[in-house]
């Protein structure tokens, strides 16, 4: 499937796509664990010069050795293919594709190429298109042009919960170009241009933040009119943080639960309570209501952009953890056995 040619296979004529997307479109062979299905085609711009950012945890970082088109991202490979062939395959599978997402990298060519590809996609199908932008190179005017080109949602990968951690892992701490204030400013502008709940932030747990700090930024973004999509840190081989551990499962489960509770306006950050290590001990709900929320299984599903039916389309099967009993995000409805396992992982009898 890989059509990469040194010096030639660059955007907008070429794109990378997630392994799951390549499988869903028939470019790669394979089976999804428990028959999970992907409903969003995740696309990534590609350039021989790669990404100018130096984020310590990212598989695409300019600091990581190797050729850009061979670097993994969020645990999996992203094979390269001609844009025209990707569009052709989406047309063949459009009944199951509920959304398309284009991810930029920090490369000045990304802005114009994002517009070109977004227009191509929107003129080819009536499938909503999200953009995961690089605020360091995207301006407010670019956001307006993205909307005119047909994009309906904007994502900003803030990733870190505090400005100190952001600068440590994405800014001056690694000699990178990113700035916390720029990211928040661009997110605010995106909410204003695209509307409430049509712009939001990706956040990664397990990067040194406390649970209280993560809860506070989730609430802040929601109060701005944005949404939050949650990831668990995964140590990319060859990255600066390849030896950094994944967050404990109970930590991640509590943050998932907190995000969902705030997202559904069931409680707010100021109603939460914490222990001396700033671990959540109370979500501001009655035990009965908390049980109902946990038993629904919804907090532990992948958080992502919805399709036109209102259901999460960007469900990224097994992107930040391996499939199996210890998977971090459920790309499908958890069953009763899953809920019982989740309760054990929450350490609910000890914490609440």
Image: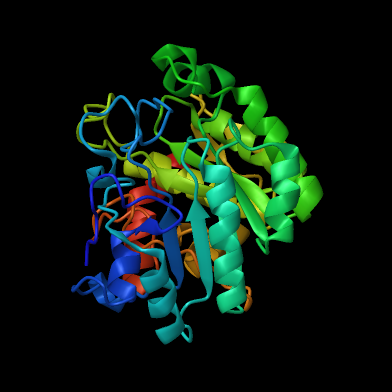
**In the image, residue 20 lies at what x, y percent?**
31, 65
**In the image, residue 225 lies at what x, y percent?**
76, 48
Instruction: Please give the count of numbered marks on the rendered protein.
Output: 0
Residue at horizontal 33 percent and vertical 76 percent from the top: 25
Q: Nearer the viewer, residue 175 or 15?
A: 15
**In the image, residue 223 lies at what x, y percent?**
76, 42
| Horizontal side, residue 276 vs residue 7: left or right | right
| Horizontal side, residue 63 vs residue 282: left or right | left
Residue at horizontal 51 percent and vertical 41 percent from the top: 109
Q: Quadrant of the N terminus?
A: bottom left
| Horizontal side, residue 184 vs residue 40: left or right | right
Residue at horizontal 29 percent and vertical 56 percent from the top: 327
Determine if residue 134 is in view.
yes
| Horizontal side, residue 315 vs residue 122: left or right | left
Q: Residue furthest front?
A: 8
Determine if residue 266 is in view.
no
**In the image, residue 245 lies at what x, y percent?**
26, 31
Q: Quadrant of residue 130?
A: bottom right
Q: Quadrant of residue 270?
A: top right
Q: Nearer the viewer, residue 323 or 113?
A: 113
90 over 347 or under it: above or below: below
Residue at horizontal 78 percent and vertical 55 percent from the top: 195
Tell me how the rendering is colored. rainbow
């Amino acid at each position: 499937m890989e059509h990469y040619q040194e010096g030639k296979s660059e955007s907008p004529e070429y794109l990378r796509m997630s392994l799951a997307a390549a499988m869903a479109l028939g470019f790669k062979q394979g089976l999804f664990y428990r028959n999970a299905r992907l409903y969003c085609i995740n696309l990534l711009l590609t350039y021989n010069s790669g990404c100018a950012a130096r984020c310590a945890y990212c598989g695409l970082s300019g600091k990581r050795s190797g050729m850009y088109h061979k670097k993994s991202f969020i645990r999996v490979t992203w094979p390269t293919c001609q844009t025209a062939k990707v569009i052709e395959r989406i047309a063949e599978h459009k009944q199951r594709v509920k959304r398309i997402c284009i991810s930029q990298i920090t490369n000045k060519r990304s802005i114009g190429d994002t517009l070109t590809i977004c227009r191509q996609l929107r003129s080819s199908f009536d499938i909503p298109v999200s953009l995961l932008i690089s605020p360091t190179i995207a301006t407010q005017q670019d956001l307006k042009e993205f909307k005119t080109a047909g994009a309906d949602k904007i994502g900003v990968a803030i990733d870190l919960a505090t400005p100190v951690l952001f600068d440590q892992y994405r800014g001056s701490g690694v000699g990178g170009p990113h700035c916390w204030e720029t990211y928040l400013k661009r997110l605010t502008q995106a909410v204003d241009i695209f509307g409430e709940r049509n712009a939001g932030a990706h956040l990664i747990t397990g990067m040194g933040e406390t649970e209280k700090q993560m809860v506070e930024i989730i609430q802040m973004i929601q109060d701005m009119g944005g949404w939050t999509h949650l990831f668990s840190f995964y140590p990319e081989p060859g990255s600066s943080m390849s030896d950094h551990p994944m967050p404990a499962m109970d930590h991640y489960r509590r943050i998932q639960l907190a995000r969902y509770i705030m997202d559904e306006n069931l409680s707010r950050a100021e109603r939460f309570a914490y222990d001396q290590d700033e671990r959540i001990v109370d979500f501001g709900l009655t035990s009965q209501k908390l049980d109902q929320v946990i038993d629904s299984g919804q907090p532990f599903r992948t958080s992502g952009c919805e399709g036109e039916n209102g259901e999460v389309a960007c469900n990224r099967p097994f992107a930040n953890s391996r499939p199996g009993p210890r998977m971090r995000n459920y790309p499908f409805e958890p069953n009763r056995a899953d809920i019982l396992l989740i309760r054990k992982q929450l350490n609910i009898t000890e914490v609440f």
